[in-house]
Image (spheres, coloured by chain):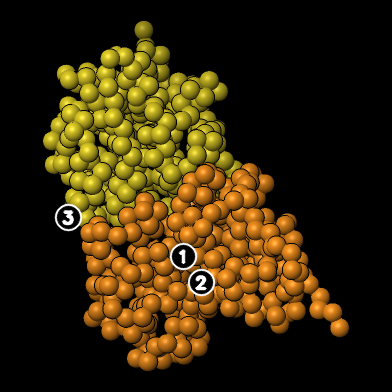
Chain colours: A orange, B yellow
Amino acid sequence: MKTRSDKRPIGIFDSGVGGLTVFKEIKKELPRENIIYLGDTARVPYGIRSPEIVMKYSFENAKFLMSKGIKILVVACNTSSSISLPSLVENFPVDVVGVVAPGARAAVARSRKKKIAVIGTETTIKSGSYAKAIKAIDKSIVINGIACPLFVPLVEEGWTKGNIMTLTAKKYLSPLKKFGADVLILGCTHYPIIKDVIAGVVKIPLIDSAAETAKEVRRILEERKILRHDSGKPKVEFFVTDAPEKFVQIGERFLGQTISNISKVNIDIL
Amino acid sequence: MKTRSDKRPIGIFDSGVGGLTVFKEIKKELPRENIIYLGDTARVPYGIRSPEIVMKYSFENAKFLMSKGIKILVVACNTSSSISLPSLVENFPVDVVGVVAPGARAAVARSRKKKIAVIGTETTIKSGSYAKAIKAIDKSIVINGIACPLFVPLVEEGWTKGNIMTLTAKKYLSPLKKFGADVLILGCTHYPIIKDVIAGVVKIPLIDSAAETAKEVRRILEERKILRHDSGKPKVEFFVTDAPEKFVQIGERFLGQTISNISKVNIDIL
């Protein structure tokens, strides 16, 4: 019997460029798949906004990707995943995968002391999404969340090394020592870029949700038998709501490879 | 003859909370005026966005304020002023005042060496708006513009003092020494909050457009004979497109006084 091949693309959205760390892992895990990535660069960052606005923007992004005929929706943004995942699952007729649950699972599997630390944007930390996801697996685990609002602008500015980056990491993360966690979740897609600096301060293993999320996407596509099996070169398309040149410039730092096939979408059609 | 009193409010918009430095000066200069302030907190910051998107958001903000029956429009955001001022002037039937021209005039009046430095957001500096405004007054003046993207997040995080703030200021501003300017324009409404740190690095006089802009607003209202002369307490209203509590919290640091009478506007009606 010939295996059916599902050519519909995987849809990924993020508030901006950070979700490319998730895109990269999905591309590695599922190299044959067609992928559409949307970065909402006209309204980035999400991590400083209210849950209501994050919900609204997430729905608009999801609708845009649905209009492109995607077979699965990946919410690469931790803030969007923290706020809008249950509503997206409820309202869209495809599987929806966020980055919070896979990250939480990986952290629980890794922690021996049952003390897990999480860092993220203000809105992600305030939402308590990681704590909820971890407690759903093991109620006895204690979680400490710290918002690190300056990490994203530092990464976008390219100051990923040097004394300003290190001092900022120390200022945010030193209080964690007292807590005594044995695992730290990087709860924002920008943070893998500065993992060496973070590891240098906290000196415990770091969990990056991107790889875990990619495995989850593969598992779902396999289970549903909707993988693409064609031998032809897969198509990758990038969309942004503002400033494609800037997305390419910063994005190539994230991806470590060239970004092409990028278009600007008019925000009004979202 | 009895002097006519014009009760219509002054309308001020900014991308967020930073424009309160302009609001404060206008309130001081024109204490009897009714004022409406709009902070577009659902889409802040503007300084990282393209000119097209800054134009679009600026028009939406202006339309909202026009619907409130304002008598003059003040664009408190340097990025908006840099990009959209001529188009706003052309398209709206009230006087429109930005912060760039007043700041440029004050700097020219102050400079003896005819070398002026400007700091601002990426989009403000790229636009060359201050250089154009200065050259229009005196073509022989040389201008050096430096974008300082991390200043805004540092101020919003409240890290306005200490080694991280100082090191960041040194990193951005040290190259200015070689240029030899004798005046530095603070081309972003957040920067007055950290003027001591900036002054400590550059050691030349700083120009803050806010006070100059307030004088310009007074001059226009006087000229048009549309001042408010009522003895009754003036009305001040704040509107934001997201997270009013956060606006109040950070805004009170900017204003040094309590913010009340704040409402959230639905972004869809803009």
Residue B240: x and y in percent read 46, 46
Assign a secondary structure to mark 3.
loop
> Badge 3 is on which residue?
B162
Query: Is residue B9 something one can see in this rendering?
Result: no
Assign a secondary structure to mark 2.
helix
Q: Nearer the viewer, residue B13 or A234?
A: A234
The vertical placement of B88 against A230, above or below, is above
Mark number displayed over residue A210: 2
Is mark 2 in CB contact (under 8 Å) with mark 1?
yes
Assign a secondary structure to mark 1.
loop
Amino acid type, callout 1: Thr
Tell whether B199 sits left or right of A12.
left
Amino acid type, callout 2: Ala
Q: Are marks 2 and 1 on the same chain?
A: yes
> Tag 2: Cα neighbours inside 10 Å, few (<14), some, or many (≥20)?
many
The vertical placement of B153 against A134, above or below, is above
What distance separates the C-alpha of mark 2 from that of mark 3?
Answer: 35 Å
> Badge 1 is on which residue?
A189
Q: Residue at x 70, y 80 (%)?
A: A222
Residue B76: x and y in percent read 38, 34
**The numbered mark 2 sits on a residue in which chain?**
A
Mark number displayed over residue A220: none
What distance separates the C-alpha of mark 2 from that of mark 1?
Answer: 8 Å
Q: Name the residue at the top extreme.
A: B1
Amino acid type, callout 3: Gly
The vertical placement of A100 against A10, above or below, is below
**The numbered mark 1 sits on a residue in which chain?**
A
